Image (cartoon, rainbow, N blue to C red):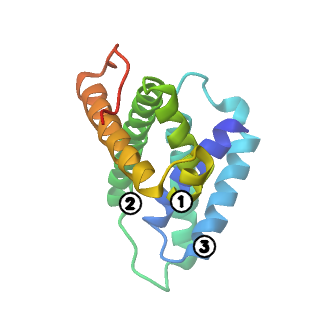
Amino acid sequence: MKLFLQSERRILGFILALVPHLADAEDLVQETCMIMWNKFDQFEKGTDFVAWGISIARYRVLNYRRSTGTRRVYFSENLMRQIDDAAVGLSVQGDERLSALQSCLGRLREKDRELIRLRYFAENSTKQTAREVGRSADSVYKSLNRIHDALLLCMRHAVKMESFPTKSLRAEG
């Protein structure tokens, strides 16, 4: 179930690139997820789950195109394969970036991680976050900016070097 939930948005993004109507795209995502669920025993553990889902989605989109082919002009099958390949590549890049972000977050000081948690994971505004930590909104805003800069630098380094820095991050200021 975790794999399905993590992949659903990426599969929807792939389908939306190929299907003009959101309602149709959402229906195709549901069809794709049903097929993935029914064929889960055919998924090879250790391979890219999103890529597998996108390949199933591609066939659902092809069927959709065949059934609605008289209404609109759509992408050629060759172009769809190229989009499919690009989507899988973006999926891998997204996974690398997510991994880098998680590693970089883990290297922040505890109080900086707490600000990030309160602001983004708890979905608080900067003012709400400031109230919770007993600081001014301006102070929290400046701290968040420094933390963002530190995370961005760490992630660029991690993705570029394909390894993560070993020292902890400190948002100076």
Q: Give above or below for 71 relative to 37.
A: below
Instruction: Please indicate whether residue 63 sits to the left or right of residue 158 in the image.
Output: right
First reached walking from the N terminus: tag 3 or tag 2: 3
Sequence-wise, which precedes: disc 1 or disc 2? 2
Q: Amino acid at mark 1?
A: Lys
Q: Secondary structure at mark 3?
A: helix
Residue denoted by label 3: 24
**Tag 3: residue type?**
Asp
Rendering coords of residue 71 (x, y %): 49, 86
Q: Out of 28 and 142, give the one closest to the viewer.
A: 142
**Badge 2: residue crowd in 10 Å (few <14, some 14–19, many ≥20):** few
- The spot of residue 52 in percent (x, y) is 54, 39
In the rendered image, which quarter is residue 165 located in? top left
User: Above or below — where is 144 with respect to 109?
Assistant: below
The x and y percentages for residue 106 are: 48, 25
The residue where tag 2 is placed is 77
